């Protein structure tokens, strides 16, 4: 009979979130690097043939990809900061309530 799988730690603990965020940031930096490399390739093609409208369009698309990947990294960092702020806020609230409970018990 199969047993039910139980996680040892919560799914959204801070270490797991940071691990996934790092992975996303690493992947987006690799995407940005590849997009800029492709941009340089198409730029060289345009320099060789200024009438090549397809290469010009591809240059624009590569720059959009590079900017999007940078924006995604910033979004991930923003979410991490918000998560950390919320985590710290809840810790402070729990500490305050703990102190209140201790104070009430001492009366």
Image (spheres, helix red, strand yellow):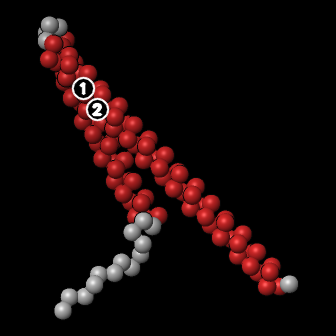
Write down the quadrant of residue 20 in the picture. Answer: bottom left
For disc 2, the marked residue is 65
The residue closer to the viewer here, 33 or 51, is 51
Vertical order, 30 against 63 (above or below)? below
Q: Decide if residue 3 is on the left or right side of residue 25.
A: left
Q: CA distance from mark 1 to mark 2?
A: 6 Å
Residue at the (30%, 47%) spot, across then down: 27
Q: Is residue 78 visible?
A: yes
Residue 85 percent across, percent down from the top left: 58, 55
Mark 1 residue element: helix
> Could you classify mark 2 by the number of other residues whose Cα lies within 10 Å: few (under 14), some (14-19), or many (20 or more)?
some
Residue 67 percent across, percent down from the top left: 35, 31
Residue 24 percent across, percent down from the top left: 34, 50
Discs 1, 2 touching: Cβ within 8 Å? yes
The residue closer to the viewer here, 9 or 102, is 102
Write down the quadrant of residue 95 in the picture. Answer: bottom right
The residue closer to the viewer here, 29 or 76, is 76
Instruction: Name the residue furthest top.
Output: 51
Vertical order, 102 against 64 (above or below)? below
Mark 2 residue element: helix
Write down the quadrant of residue 62 in the picture. Answer: top left
User: Which of the image's four quarters has the N terminus?
Assistant: bottom left
């Amino acid at each position: 009979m199969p047993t039910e799988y139980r996680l040892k730690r919560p799914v959204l603990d801070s270490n797991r979130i940071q691990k996934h965020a790092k992975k996303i940031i690493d992947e987006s930096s690799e995407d940005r690097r590849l997009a800029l490399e492709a941009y340089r390739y198409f730029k060289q093609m345009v320099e060789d043939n200024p009438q090549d409208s397809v290469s010009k369009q591809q240059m624009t698309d590569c720059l959009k990809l590079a900017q999007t990947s940078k924006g995604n990294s910033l979004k991930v960092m923003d979410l991490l900061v918000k998560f950390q702020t919320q985590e710290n806020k809840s810790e402070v609230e729990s500490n305050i309530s703990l102190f209140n409970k201790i104070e009430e018990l001492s009366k």
